[in-house]
Amino acid sequence: MSRTVYVNGKFLPEEDAKISVFDRGFLFADGVYEVTAVLNGKLVDKQGHLSRLRRSLSEIDMPSPADDTEIEAIQRELIQRNSVTEGLVYLQITRGAAERSFFFPDPETTRPSLVLFTQSVPLIANPKAEHGIKVLTVEDIRWTRRDIKTVQLLPSSMCKTAARAQGKDDAWMVQDGYITEGTSNNVFLVTKNHIMTRRLSSTILPGITRASVLAYAEEAGYEIQEVSFSVKEAQSADEAFITSATAFVLPVVEIDGQPVGDGRPGPVTRRLRELYIAESLRRSE
Ligand code: PDD
């Protein structure tokens, strides 16, 4: 049975869902997106994702085709129609279809496109959680406004594919000698029970999972330092991990062929994954 997706006001079977070839998302990557996890059919970190969506839209001066209440209603309808118990809801807003021009079209005449779909995937029983992932470091070749969650994902896609060609699970991107973030996740180190992660700026996406994990870690008594670190510093940490809406907290056990710690997921990472899952199950709505 095909999935039901949402396109510009309609719930449709995925094979009937269509977007114009003139859509600026297609021609200019002129769009923003959000990925929200679903556990037990409920949304995880819902408000954080909606707030970041508003910020992304405002940073690129794009009008919104729907308010938060309408978006949430569409998300819930899709979760229900597709019987998603565990997985994600993807949401994308683009500036809409207009004659091809580098200038933004007149918002009075061009309506933004709104697309949502779901994916059913096991997030808690992620096989990578048990053994951890291996990463390759690469130069960060993205633009300089990485704080905006735009659909321009080609650089990240290239880096991730290059990592896989070398037998790794993901790439960590490096700028001026310091790690920025993973291709689709934020990066953390643990040394002597201190949790370290890069400070927020336009060089990284302000991860919603990052914020929740930091809050739960602080409540649990861990000391947090928002600092930049080099590849060498990362390789000599006790533990390393990533966070994202779909990975939750995932251990990183190897960086550029060097094992992190003893090359196995560490105790702090394991505890933070358990904590994040427990809190998400409790708070999801
Ligand atoms: N990616 N950094 C980048 C570059 C990302 O693309 C993502 C999320 C994150 C983590 O953000 P959050 O915790 O809010 O998911 C950090 C999503 C999952 C994706 O593109 O599929």
Image (tube, rainbow, N blue to C red):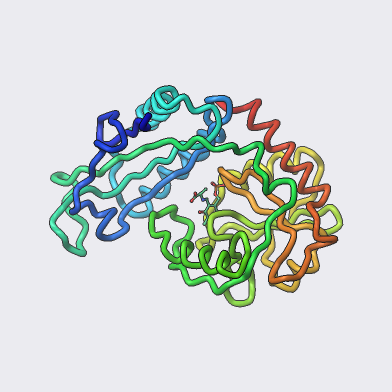
Of residues 282 and 171, the one drawn nearer to the viewer in this rendering: 171
Q: How many marks?
A: 0
Asked which quadrant contains residue 227, the reply is bottom right
Q: Residue at x 47, y 67 (%)?
A: 158
Q: Quadrant of the N terminus?
A: top left
Task: Name above or below for residue 163 compared with residue 74.
Answer: below
Residue 265, position in %: x, y?
78, 52
Task: Name above or below for residue 119 compared with residue 187.
Answer: above
Q: Is residue 84 left or right of residue 109?
A: right
Q: Residue at x 50, y 62 (%)?
A: 202
Residue 251, position in %: x, y?
72, 52
Q: Quadrant of the C terminus?
A: top right
Residue 35, position in %: x, y?
47, 43
Asked which quadrant contains residue 256, the reply is bottom right
Q: Residue at x 19, y 48 (%)?
A: 20
Task: Name above or below for residue 265 compared with residue 177.
Answer: above
Of residues 218 and 158, the one drawn nearer to the viewer in this rendering: 158
Q: Residue at x 42, y 44 (%)?
A: 53
Residue 184, position in %: x, y?
53, 55
Q: Is residue 57 left or right of residue 12?
A: right
Of residues 46 and 246, the one drawn nearer to the viewer in this rendering: 246
View extreme (bottom): residue: 176
